[in-house]
Image: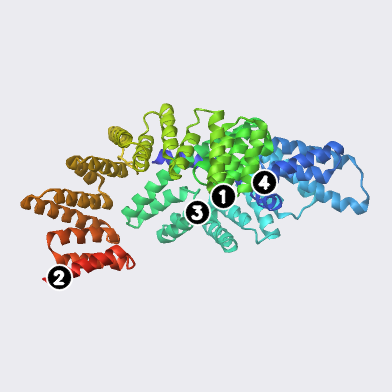
Amino acid sequence: MGRQLSYYTVVLVVLSVCHLTLWHVTVAFSQETAAEDITARIRAYKTELAIDGTRVETRLQLAKIYLQIEAYADAVNEYRHIIALMEVNPVSEGERTERNADLAAAYHGLGLAYTGLEKFEDAIAAYQRAMRNVSDWAHTHAALASVYTNMHRYAEALDAYKVAVVLDPNDEMIHHQLGNVYSKRGERSAAMQHQQRAIAIAPEFAAAHYQLGLLYAQEKRWTDAIASYRKAYTHDEMLVEALYNLAQASLRVGNPSAAREQMALFEKRKATLTPLYQLRGALQREQGTVERAQILTNIARLYLKNGFYEKAVWEYQKALGMAPQLVLAYNGLGIAYAMLGKYSEAVTAQQKALELQPNFAKASAGLGLVSLRQNQTEAALEHYQRAVDSDPQFLEAHLKIGFILLNQERYAEAIDTYRTILKIKPDDPEIYYNLGLCYAHQARVIDDTFQSSEDLMVSALGALEKAVELSLSDTDDSNKAEQLPTQPPFLMEAYYLIGELQGSKGDLDAAERAYLTSGLPKAYHALAQLRAKFAKKNEVGGERGMDLEIARRYAEEAICLDPNVASYYNTLALIDFRRGAYQQAEKAIRKALELEPENRNYRQGLKQISGKLAVE
């Protein structure tokens, strides 16, 4: 565990070089620039500069966006251009204050860009030039302090942060970073004071809660540490380091069960996030614009995969700001927007992908997703069909077509689709399950000969049994790998449908085996009905009574598993009625009526049972 934590901590340190230093610029600029506007703004600013390259304000805006999207090399070039323009052009005394502010902003931005490139000495020089032009900007002193911190020059960092906090005492990040420097210097009391101040300003500031938890742990204040770690993770689920330390603190207070639970969650979350941190490290090392855009696209894809849709949108937008022809980024952006319910933006993104690559199957599928999420199933079908026309091996699009057709009860078409899918993925148990489901439904609605229906039922049974076989094979493989076996969610339904089909064939034993393996409440209910049906055919008194007793036990088991289904009580009432147990039948049918008081059949059943009781 120690090695794992060490690796994780190293990754966080790599990320902190940019993240903490550039925090102010990210917050400020995200308020100015909506994510969906980035590419358009870059294009607009470049158009303006093509007409007049001396527009300082336009270049400042463009440079700020480059900082925002982590295009640091481009930002450096813009800020250098701005500085050169301003320093060569003389200004009047009245304009000097304004020019000094612009120069300070340019040097400050240049410092941030150099920091992103890990050119720390250049960053220091840029910040110092910024302060010569304007000396009272807290964020410049804080940025300089952050660079000193990254270089382990803690005394200089402390001096710079002290100036920054005097200039802006209500900035939570300055207090947080100042607290971190005090902590590195072993000045725990001052560190706590500033982390607490950061939290007072911003109560949901996860990093401050986490650092405060570390400080409490150093003083063995385990209860306070636990509270801080919990708040840190609650406010930022990406901060999985808090889970590890929470587990350690739980052990310290004698709560090993909580520690095990927290450590298990830490391992699970770390496994999910480790690829993300590895990509962040790669991004930090890579300076090429196109290469950085591709890495950002991969980062966005991981966010998308794990359900962090807003973060995915932002990373895709950054990638497109660097490389506006990146088709995969437009496609991923469209999917993220679709998952957020921003359908207009999703369509625009996918259409842009198709403009760049007209036969891009994933973009057509992305449009299908937008339509499907808006319940526009026919439009969704058209888009998904266009996707498989472009890429006949595109499994996800085929699956979506099968899903839509199955839900629309277009079973014959769905059968054709699932048979096509099996050519692409021949050993998938769920595909066989869906195919069997389609065959079974088609057998019930077919308007053809009885023989055709028989053939369909045989096909359904074969597909469902294949689904079970493959599912059990997968489970066996999991056991061999010493993993916990997991049953696919459709497996019990497959057994239930096999029971239905075997029962319709008259094979009671095979149906019973399948139903019992299913274990579903409705399977026991079906067994009760099937046994009662066989009892009706059996005229031998003893065997008939035994079948009815077995049927009754199955009905009771269905009720035990799900006591809120009226039809289960009705079946029990029918069985008891046939057994001559009219009082029990009355009790069961009254319960059915409690659940469905307007059901005419149940009322008629009660009337019949009451008639028998009256005769008795």
* Callouts 1 and 3 close, C-beta under 8 Å: no
Residue 590 numbered mark, or none = none
Between disc 3 and disc 2, whose residue precedes? 3
Report helix, strand or loop for mark 3: helix
**Of the residues under marks 4 and 2, which one precedes in the sequence?**
4
Residue named by callout 2: 613
Which label lies toward us, 3 or 2? 2
- Identify residue type, mark 2: Leu
| Residue to which mark 4 is pinned | 36
Residue 545 % position (x, y): 9, 54
Kind of residue at disc 4: Glu
Secondary structure beneath label 2: helix
Secondary structure under tag 4 reads helix
- Please state if 444 lies on the left or on the right of 59 as rendered: left
Instruction: Give the residue number, with chain letter if any, for mark 3.
Output: 210
Residue 502 at x, y percent in the picture: 24, 40
Q: Is residue 273 visible?
A: yes
Question: Could you tell whether 515 is left or right of 23 in the image?
Answer: left
Q: Are marks 1 and 4 in contact (CB under 8 Å)?
A: no
Question: Alpha-carbon distance for marks 1 and 3?
Answer: 29 Å
Tag 4–tag 3 contact (CB < 8 Å)? no
The image position of residue 562, as x and y in percent, is 28, 58
Q: Dot 1: what SS? A: loop
| Mark 1 or mark 3: whose residue is earlier in sequence | 3
Left or right position of 610 against 383: left
Residue 71 visible to the viewer:
no
